[in-house]
């Protein structure tokens, strides 16, 4: 019997790594991210996604870039989140391609509130080697969120294509507040057997102190890299960024002092995000999370 297909549309910074570890560990679920290698490189949905092991009850396709494919790397300054193509058209084309391949699939979409999303993306910004302050980077990040995280656009497409009853929308805040209950909710909706999984945070956003430390490290590292001969700069930079990303898991464990980064957004920008999030509704059990988005 063919496996039930489930597609996880993982917006970046919404706990996708945590979910992918859960999917990989669950005995009923076939989850192989290597199927997405061609898509990640090209942005094309094609038959490379189809192969599955029918020995599993569920075939789970999970990839953050299904929500936001970053475009052609040769033309994109991805470190600054600039989109130089029609991201909304790409989101629609991706959904249509998935519907064509998996017409009976069910869909999981995880979303995140504006304020914590901005501070989390600032952490990501620093881990690409940037040195800007939060205030300097905020306008860049806000603009990219309004372009890429238009929840109404993405949710509307998937509900229309796959049917509203086949689309589960969950808030990242639910995962952050109660990870076990979050997984139980997913299991009930899709019909997974309850599975004991040890929840732990995979990626943690920087606080005010650890962000300052990363900025300083970036500043001196980039100063050094500029002194290296041109033919070796790229290799040195890539090596440094790899080291930096391996180091980030230790930062918040080591630097426990410091406070959460507070988003001082303009009311206008906040209102734009809210208008783009009116379709985010979680149902009676999760009603309290609606206030994050509307």
Image (cartoon, rainbow, N blue to C red):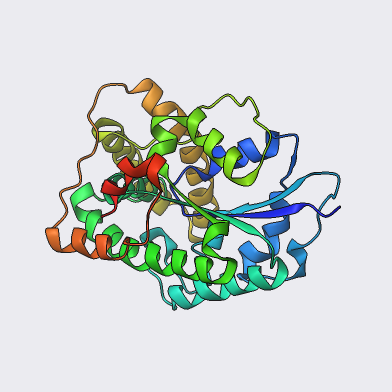
Tell whether 84 sits left or right of 142: right
Q: Position of residue 31 (x, y in %)?
A: 71, 46
Return the residue nearer the eye: 237 or 193: 193
Q: Is residue 269 above or below residue 236?
A: below
Q: Position of residue 128 (x, y in %)?
A: 42, 50
Q: Is residue 22 above or below residue 112?
A: above
- Quadrant location of the C terminus in the rendered image: bottom left
Q: Is residue 168 visible?
A: yes
Return the residue nearer the eye: 36 or 233: 36
Q: Is residue 209 above or below residue 3?
A: above
Return the residue nearer the eye: 279 or 60: 279
Task: Determine which quarter of the picture holds residue 107.
Answer: bottom right
Q: Is residue 150 visible?
A: no
Which residue is at a point 49% across and 35% down the rendered structure image? 182
Q: Position of residue 281 (x, y in %)?
A: 38, 53
Tell whether 33 sits left or right of 184: right
Which residue is at a point 84% across and 49% down the rendered structure image? 53
Which residue is at a point 26% across and 65% down the rendered structure image? 275
Q: Position of residue 229 (x, y in %)?
A: 48, 56
For this orientation, the residue located farthest to the front is: 284
Which residue is at a point 55% across and 33% down the rendered structure image? 184
Q: Is residue 242 above or below residue 227?
A: above
The tally of labels here is 0
């Amino acid at each position: 019997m063919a496996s039930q297909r489930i597609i996880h549309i993982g917006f970046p910074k919404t706990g996708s790594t945590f979910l992918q570890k859960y999917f990989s560990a669950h005995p009923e679920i076939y989850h192989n991210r290597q199927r997405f290698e061609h898509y990640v490189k090209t942005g094309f949905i094609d038959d490379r996604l189809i192969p599955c092991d029918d020995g599993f009850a569920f075939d789970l396709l999970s990839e953050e870039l299904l929500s936001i494919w970053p475009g052609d790397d040769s033309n994109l300054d991805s470190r600054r989140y600039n989109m130089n193509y029609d991201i909304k058209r790409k989101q629609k084309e991706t959904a249509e391609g998935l519907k064509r391949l998996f017409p009976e699939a069910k869909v999981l979409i995880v979303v995140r509130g504006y304020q914590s999303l901005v501070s989390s993306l600032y952490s990501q910004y620093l881990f690409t080697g940037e040195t800007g302050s939060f205030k300097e980077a905020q306008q860049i990040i806000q603009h990219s969120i309004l372009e890429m995280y238009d929840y109404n656009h993405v949710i509307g497409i998937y509900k229309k294509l796959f049917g509203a009853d086949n689309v589960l929308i969950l808030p990242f805040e639910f995962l952050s507040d109660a990870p076990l209950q979050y997984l139980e909710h997913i299991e009930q909706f899709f019909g997974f057997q309850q599975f004991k999984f040890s929840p732990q945070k995979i990626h943690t956003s920087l606080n005010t102190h650890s962000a300052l430390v990363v900025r300083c490290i970036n500043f001196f590292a980039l100063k050094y890299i500029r002194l290296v001969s041109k033919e070796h700069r790229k290799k040195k930079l890539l090596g440094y960024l790899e080291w930096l990303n391996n180091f980030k898991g230790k930062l918040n464990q080591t630097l426990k002092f410091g406070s959460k980064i507070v988003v001082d957004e303009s009311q206008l920008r906040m209102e734009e995000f809210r208008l783009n999030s009116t379709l985010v509704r979680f149902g009676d059990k999760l009603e309290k999370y609606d206030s994050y988005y509307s």
